[in-house]
Amino acid sequence: MNVGEQAGRPEELSLNLEVVEDDELLALVVDEFIRRDRNAAVTLTEIARLHGVLGQIIDDYWWPIWARADELTTARWADLAVGLVRWGFNEGRKHPAVPPGRAT
């Protein structure tokens, strides 16, 4: 995928070996996939709303602690998403749906 491409559906993105081997580029493609997902927009809106509510009820002492825990959780899930995409891509290369040399 060309990172600058604009397309509507997550399925329109594609992976190749160059993308999968580049940590930053792969993370960008995964982020773009998530950004294009319709359900993600709804979820992100709800998360933003809840952050606003929490910001109003959690005092200045606890807010940074909660925010840091949330940041670490998000970073961990982002790392896992990239790792799962890389693993799936590599598994697909080992076990292609159409064996090499066969007509598609």
Image (cartoon, grey):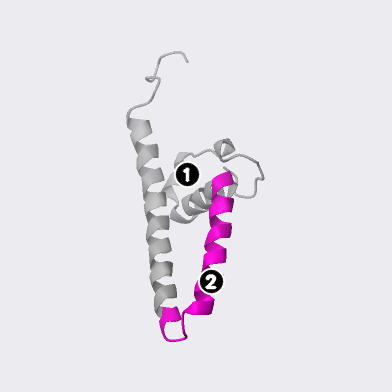
Residue at 52% across, 52% down: 31
- Comparing 69 with 80, the one in front is 69
State the residue lying farthest toward the front. 57
Q: Main secondary structure of the magenta part?
A: helix
- Classify mark 2: helix, strand or loop: helix
Is residue 40 located in the magenta-colored stretch of the structure? yes
- Comparing 26 with 49, the one in front is 49
Is residue 13 located in the magenta-colored stretch of the structure? no
Residue 82 in picture, x, y percent from top left: 41, 50
Is 16 on the left-hand or right-hand side of 84? right
Quickly name the residue at label 2: 53
Give residue 100's quadrant in the image. top left
Quickly name the residue at label 1: 18
Q: Is residue 64 visible?
A: yes
Label 2 CA crowd tier, 10 Å (few <14, some 14–19, many 20+): few
Q: Which residues are magenta?
A: 37-64
- Mark 2 and mark 1 in contact? Answer it, CB < 8 Å: no
Q: Nearer the viewer, mark 2 or mark 1?
A: 2
Give residue 1's quadrant in the image. top right
Residue 18 in picture, x, y percent from top left: 47, 44
Give residue 101's quadrant in the image. top left
- Classify mark 1: helix, strand or loop: helix
Is 86 on the left-hand or right-hand side of 38? left
Relative to 45, is 88 above or below?
A: above
Residue at 53% across, 38% down: 14
